[in-house]
Every structure is written in structure tokens, then in C-alpha cells.
């Protein structure tokens, strides 16, 4: 049985008691992931075997004994992150820019190690446009051979329904750098979101974060994009998949099958 790391979430609830023996509740929730771990600083990422946000559980392939503050890149699932930088700033510094300078007393400020910020867990911008408020926490999904049975589960499916509304996606800074500087014509990175109910697919929503298939870089998302998930309807599980061609990265043995997610919104109804 997968262990859940519980978190507190505030939701708008409409609750009715009936016959003095039960209740029903209907509310919309948005998983912003803010405040999930106030102890860990920005520029870091953390993975745990599983965690929950309200009635939604997020699963990882790691075991409890492997809980780490530096995620195991050989295993798939969700990584909690607060690292986000504009890709233009990162590339400028890495390609010869410098952030050293005179402090006024003759000393020189220490240079930032910008290369180290291009981890798989860094989002490609700082706009915070989709999150609006909060501390800027989001999650990064890693799709690889070692994956949990399901990526997200609705924990109250036996007594209620979960209807997906939307979510926000973004590239990681590492993926953005690849498509800006190294991608081969034909490369692309596509995110697929599939809902399941009673073992059957309820539908799939796809979005291409980067596309180099026409011979020119037609699309590279470096800011948050909101996807409409209403066509998936009522779900018990949600699975994510990265469909990608990354010729130069694969040839070099680099794993770039990551994307960032935030603001997973759903309409919840429970009756007991």
C-alpha cells in the first residue's frame, strides 16, 4: 500500500447533513502546492514516496527508504520544486555573461553558478502568471521506465466524484536550453494527460511544449500555459506521459523527459 504524506488544504466547501447520519460536500479545489515544505529553500527540489493535496494523491516510484532531497533521476514521478529562472538570463550568464561586480569597497561580489541552476527541476521563467499568489512552489513530472502504477489518484472515489477542470504546464529550464541551443530538426516534446474511471480511459488532452518538426523552432513554451481538462470528465486516476523525440540529447545519454505542473483544478463531490 502506498503511503500518503498528508498536507493541509483550504477549500471552498458546501456541506449538508442529512438524516443525522451523513453528509455531502461539493467544492472546487486548486492544487497550488504552495506551502508544501516551508523548510526547504528555493533552488532545491525534494521527492517523497507519495504526497497528497486535499483528496488527490501524487505517487512516485521511489520507496520510503529512498526519500531524498536530491531526487533520484532514474525513477519517475513527481518532484516538489521552488526553482525558477528566466531562460534568457540563464543562457546569457552561461554563454559568457557575468554577475560579478564592484561592491564599492574594492571587493568583488561572488559569481553565481548559473550552470548549476539548469537542473531538471528548474522552471523556465519567473512570471508566476498562472499561480497568481503563493510562494512559487510547483511540481516537476519525470517520465521514465521506472514509474508508479498511477501518477495521480482521487482518494475518495468510493464516496464521490472528481471532475478535472484545468492545469498549468511549463518547460524546465534544461529542456528550454536544449531546444534553444542543441535541438535537431524533428525534435519535439509533447505532454499527454489521460483520465481513467473504472479501468477505462475517459480521454486524453495533449500539449506540445516544444516543436522543431517543421525544420524551424515553431513552438517553445517558456512561460506557464493553462490547459483545459474538462473533456476528461469524472476520473479516478490521472496518468501523465511525455511523448518526445530528442535526438541529440538521447545520443548523449541525457534524460530530458521532464515538465513542470501547477494549479491542478478539479470539482469535487462527496456523499457519505
Image (cartoon, rainbow, N blue to C red):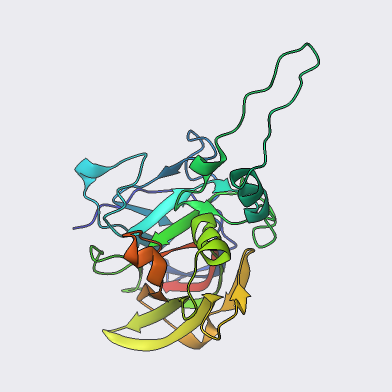
Q: Residue at x 54, y 78 (%)?
A: 211
Q: Nearer the viewer, residue 72 or 135?
A: 72
Residue 111 horizontal side relative to residue 139, left or right: right
Q: Residue at x 27, y 56 (%)?
A: 75
Q: Residue at x 34, y 87 (%)?
A: 201
**Farthest residue toward the right?**
104
Residue 231 horizontal side relative to residue 152, left or right: right
Q: Quadrant of residue 93?
A: top right
Quadrant location of the N terminus? Answer: bottom left
Q: Quadrant of residue 66?
A: top left
Q: Can residue 233 be seen by looking at this rendering?
A: no
**Farthest residue toward the front?**
96
Q: Nearer the viewer, residue 66 or 98?
A: 98
Quadrant location of the C terminus? Answer: bottom left
**Farthest residue toward the top?**
105
Residue 207 coordinates in the image, percent (x, y): 52, 79
Residue 227 coordinates in the image, percent (x, y): 58, 76
Residue 120 coordinates in the image, percent (x, y): 44, 53
Above or below residue 171? Residue 106 is above
Above or below residue 65? Residue 101 is above
Residue 232 coordinates in the image, percent (x, y): 46, 85
Amino acid at each position: 500500500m502506498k503511503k500518503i504524506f498528508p498536507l493541509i488544504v483550504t477549500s471552498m466547501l458546501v456541506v449538508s447533513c442529512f438524516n443525522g447520519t451523513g453528509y455531502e460536500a461539493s467544492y472546487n479545489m486548486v492544487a497550488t502546492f504552495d506551502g508544501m515544505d516551508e523548510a526547504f529553500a528555493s533552488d532545491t527540489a525534494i521527492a517523497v514516496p507519495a504526497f497528497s493535496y486535499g483528496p488527490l494523491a501524487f505517487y512516485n516510484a521511489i520507496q520510503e527508504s529512498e526519500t531524498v532531497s536530491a531526487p533520484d533521476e532514474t525513477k519517475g514521478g513527481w518532484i516538489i520544486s521552488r526553482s525558477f529562472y528566466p531562460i534568457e538570463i540563464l543562457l546569457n550568464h552561461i554563454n559568457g555573461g557575468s554577475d560579478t561586480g564592484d561592491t564599492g569597497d574594492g571587493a568583488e561580489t561572488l559569481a553565481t553558478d548559473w550552470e548549476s541552476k539548469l537542473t531538471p527541476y528548474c522552471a523556465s521563467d519567473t512570471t508566476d502568471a498562472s499561480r497568481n499568489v503563493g510562494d512559487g512552489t510547483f511540481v516537476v513530472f519525470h517520465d521514465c521506465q521506472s514509474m508508479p502504477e498511477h501518477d495521480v489518484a482521487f482518494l475518495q472515489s468510493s464516496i464521490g466524484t472528481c471532475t478535472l477542470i484545468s492545469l498549468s504546464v511549463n518547460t524546465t529550464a534544461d529542456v528550454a536550453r536544449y531546444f534553444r541551443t542543441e535541438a535537431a530538426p524533428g525534435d519535439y516534446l509533447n505532454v499527454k494527460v489521460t483520465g481513467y474511471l473504472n479501468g477505462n480511459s475517459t480521454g486524453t488532452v495533449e500539449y506540445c511544449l516544444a516543436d522543431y518538426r517543421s525544420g524551424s523552432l515553431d513552438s517553445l513554451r517558456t512561460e506557464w500555459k493553462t490547459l483545459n481538462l474538462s473533456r476528461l470528465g469524472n476520473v479516478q486516476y490521472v496518468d501523465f506521459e511525455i511523448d518526445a523525440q530528442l535526438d541529440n540529447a538521447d545520443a548523449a545519454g541525457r534524460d530530458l523527459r521532464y515538465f513542470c505542473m501547477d494549479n491542478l483544478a478539479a470539482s469535487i463531490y462527496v456523499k457519505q
